[in-house]
């Protein structure tokens, strides 16, 4: 995670009312007409700032102008040009992160914010924007952590205080800004983390985890749409082991395992962990990279050990590492691996802890989720550690229909053409469908608020959202294109002896890994072929404009 240029007058990361982090929100959403990004980080002390190359600043200013015009992709290109000239330009990293956040590209936004935090450790806006993204994904505990970071860097940051109060009112935390009450706990039940019976809260002091929170989930497989092969594997290898340990012992099967859930973003990897715990009656520990990794030597290793120790004391227990690639990054430095010594030490400690689980796995199930399985250290992926890998594909036509029905199940609806909605979202992720449905539901809600006349959710509401280019698109289209170039292969044109030559460079997956992840590679190739791309566009256009 990273710090970003702070906003003047405590109006949010962009420094203007209406910027993404200036309004608390419960679902990730793009802003149609956001204000311009910030020019100077107000929370960063003057001695942190570095002189900016004038040419870089010109690109940055052009990016801000394009941002104001809602030309977000063009704005990103200007920020990229600014960073090519001045790689230490914190404002350019922050404004690009803000633009990525508006486009719901949270992974890219977080990477930029991590750089900002390195460049400006005292910035308050970077933690605020990271918290905003966590809150948008219903990661309330993660959001709280980053809002506290923002306040630590700027105790007078009103926006961070307001956000923290809002979060505390939802998750029933006793703090300076929030008070315990049954009402607040009921509010918490609206969210995924509310479907839990929490056992205290994670306590962190001076970079060390002093107490590890765990909970029990009430979510069941009935709430998980599709993913039948995934659920079958989970029932046979995790739930059965928890419910019938004597049967597993009879056949000398281990009562624990490590598994990686991988696939495109928004595929339900995180959600299904709660369903596993709910079906099996197991405890769950959410292991967060931002809580584990600390800059001071030894803290990272101690934090990992504390998490595994808590699991051993409370079996059966699932330890869930979201964004595993952020912690188990490849060692060795350079572009293919993590250069941070803290992360290298984290991987080494991770191997030690996983070896302990391998030797004595009684009731410990370690699950890692990632969109970038190729970035995880190979030693972690070997048999006995994270030896099993489960691919989460995007939903098919039938599953998309079911998802629209599921997300509108508690909403008054008129006649809905579920098949048409499924065609209009060909190639969308489950998170995309949830976001679109949530936006559509807001239309009759606001209508009733403004006119005091109730009406039902209609196909017109759904179509209006889907046709809005700022919020109705697929998050996977760009992801597939990016991943193909980065992971499988890419063609580069070089000038050799005055002649153009095309050179194919292999991606991050070696030949063996391409076999291991053949389902994902097949999916990537299929979704980036010119025929498939054209077919998806045609299918969507037909559903949106004809029927």
Image (cartoon, rainbow, N blue to C red):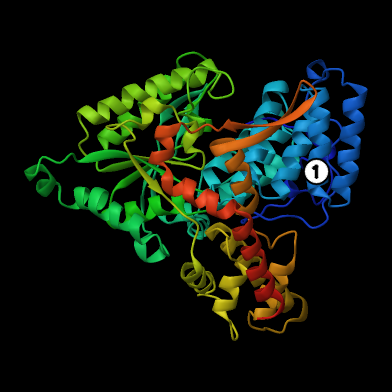
Residue name at image x 30 percent, y 52 percent: 234
Which of the image's four quarters has the C terminus? bottom right
Comparing 442 with 523, the one in front is: 523
Q: Position of residue 223 (x, y in %)?
A: 41, 64
Q: Is residue 477 left or right of residue 332?
A: right
Q: Position of residue 507 (x, y in %)?
A: 55, 33
Comparing 498 with 150, the one in front is: 498
Q: Is residue 42 placed above or below 161 in the rendered structure?
A: above
Comparing 69 with 141, the one in front is: 69
Which of the image's four quarters has the N terminus? top right
Residue 514: quarter of image: top left
Q: Position of residue 139 (x, y in %)?
A: 54, 47
Q: Is residue 206 placed above or below 487 in the rendered structure?
A: above
Query: Disc 1 marks which residue?
Result: 11
Residue name at image x 33 percent, y 51 percent: 277
Q: Position of residue 509 (x, y in %)?
A: 48, 33
Q: Is residue 365 visible?
A: no
Residue name at image x 75 percent, y 59 percent: 470
Q: Is residue 191 left or right of residue 250?
A: right
Number of other residues with Cα within 10 Å of mark 1, as a class: few under 14, some 14 to 19, many 20 or more:
many
């Amino acid at each position: 995670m990273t710090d970003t240029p702070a906003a003047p007058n405590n109006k949010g990361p962009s420094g203007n009312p209406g910027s993404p982090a200036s309004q608390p929100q419960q679902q990730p959403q793009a802003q149609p007409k956001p204000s311009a990004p910030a020019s100077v980080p107000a929370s960063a002390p003057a001695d942190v700032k570095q002189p900016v190359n004038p040419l870089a600043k010109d690109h940055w200013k052009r990016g801000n102008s394009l941002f104001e015009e809602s030309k977000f992709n063009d704005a990103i290109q200007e920020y990229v040009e600014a960073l090519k000239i001045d790689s230490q330009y914190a404002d350019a990293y922050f404004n690009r992160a803000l633009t990525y956040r508006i486009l719901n590209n949270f992974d890219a936004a977080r990477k930029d914010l991590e750089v900002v935090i390195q460049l400006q450790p005292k910035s308050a806006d970077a933690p605020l924007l990271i918290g905003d993204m966590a809150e948008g994904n219903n990661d309330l505990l993660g959001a709280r952590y980053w809002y506290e970071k923002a306040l630590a860097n700027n105790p007078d940051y009103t926006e961070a205080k307001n956000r923290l109060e809002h979060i505390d009112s939802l998750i029933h935390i006793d703090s300076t800004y929030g008070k315990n009450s049954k009402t607040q706990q009921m509010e918490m039940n609206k969210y995924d983390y509310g479907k839990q019976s929490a056992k205290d809260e994670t306590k962190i002091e001076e970079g060390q985890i002093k107490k590890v929170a765990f909970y029990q989930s009430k979510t069941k497989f009935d709430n998980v749409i599709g993913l039948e092969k995934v659920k079958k594997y989970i029932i046979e290898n995790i739930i059965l082991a928890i419910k019938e340990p004597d049967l597993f012992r009879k056949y000398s099967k281990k009562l624990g395992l490590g598994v990686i859930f991988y696939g495109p973003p928004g595929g339900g990897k995180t959600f299904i962990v709660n369903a596993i715990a709910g079906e099996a009656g197991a405890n769950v520990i959410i292991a967060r990279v931002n809580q584990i990794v600390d800059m001071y030597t030894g803290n990272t290793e101690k934090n990992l050990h504390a998490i595994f120790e808590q699991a051993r004391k409370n079996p059966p227990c699932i330890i869930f590492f979201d964004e595993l690639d952020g912690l188990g990054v490849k060692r060795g430095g350079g572009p293919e691996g993590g250069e941070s010594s803290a992360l290298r030490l984290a991987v080494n400690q991770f191997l030690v802890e996983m070896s302990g689980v391998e030797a004595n796995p009684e009731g410990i199930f370690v699950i890692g989720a990632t969109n970038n399985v190729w970035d995880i250290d190979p030693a972690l992926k070997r048999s006995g550690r994270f030896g099993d890998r489960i691919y989460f594909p995007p939903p098919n036509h039938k599953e998309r229909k079911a998802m629209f029905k599921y997300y509108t199940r508690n909403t008054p609806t008129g006649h809905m053409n579920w098949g048409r909605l499924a065609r209009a979202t060909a190639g969308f992720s489950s998170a995309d469908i949830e976001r679109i449905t949530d936006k559509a539901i807001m239309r009759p809600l606001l209508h009733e608020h403004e006119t005091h006349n109730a009406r039902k959710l209609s196909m017109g509401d759904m179509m209006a959202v889907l046709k809005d280019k700022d919020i109705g698109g697929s998050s996977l289209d760009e992801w597939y294109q990016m991943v193909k170039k980065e992971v499988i292969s890419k063609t580069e044109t070089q000038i050799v002896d005055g002649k153009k030559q095309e050179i194919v460079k292999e991606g991050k997956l070696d030949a063996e890994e391409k076999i291991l992840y053949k389902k994902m590679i097949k999916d990537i190739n299929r979704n980036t072929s010119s025929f498939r791309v054209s077919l998806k566009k045609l299918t969507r256009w037909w559903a949106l404009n004809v029927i």
